[in-house]
Amino acid sequence: MTRTENVVWYEILDKRKTGFKFLRQKPVYKFIFDFYCRELLLVIEIDGGYHQKIKHVDRERDLFLKNLNMETLRITNEEILNDLEKVRLRIMDYIEERKVSLFKGKTPKGKGF
């Protein structure tokens, strides 16, 4: 994992903080996701400079995942390094939006919201 992926993993994606289990470097289909939550069908990708060169590949992958009802949240290394609190809030808001859209007011199994 990269330095910024480690920061997100240890500072934000802890199950005690999010309420959901995230896996890191998770292979799904033909992809390897930086972070993946099966219950939310949510992929979080940390994009470094390399992703500027392959934006079209990322867009195609995100569209493929969307067709499977999976969402991708992309965050850049710069965002993490410059304002981690803003990134934390963005991720938590995104988790909340996913929870509402997937469960429509119902409580997922084993979760106490």
Image: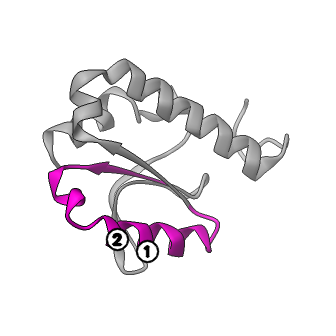
The quadrant of the image that shows the C terminus is: top right
Residue 60's disc number = 1
| Relative depth, front residue between 38 and 31 | 31
Residue 33 location (% of width, % of height):
35, 61
Tell me the residue that label 2 is attached to. Answer: 56
| Relative depth, front residue between 94 and 9 | 94
Q: Is residue 28 above or below residue 21?
A: below
Question: In the current view of this chain or complex, which residue is farthest to the bottom?
Answer: 30
Provide the secondary structure element on which disc 1 rests. helix
Instruction: State the extent of the magenta-drawn residues as a range.
Output: 43-70
Q: Residue at x 41, y 22 (%)?
A: 86
Marks 2 and 1, how far apart at CA: 6 Å
Q: Is residue 113 above or below residue 5?
A: above
Q: Residues within 10 Å of mark 2 (few under 14, many from 20)?
A: few
Whether residue 108 can be seen here: no
Residue 45's disc number = none
Q: Is residue 65 above or below residue 13?
A: below
Q: Is residue 14 above or below residue 82?
A: below
Q: Residue at x 65, y 45 (%)?
A: 98
Say whether marks 2 and 1 touch (CB < 8 Å): yes
What is the three-letter code of the residue carrying label 1? Answer: Glu
Question: In the current view of this chain or complex, which residue is farthest to the right?
Answer: 105
Q: Residue at x 25, y 67 (%)?
A: 54
| Relative depth, front residue between 110 and 42 | 42
Q: Is residue 41 magenta?
A: no
Q: Residues within 10 Å of mark 1 (few under 14, many from 20)?
A: few
Residue 47 location (% of width, % of height):
27, 50
What colour scheme does the image use? Answer: one colour
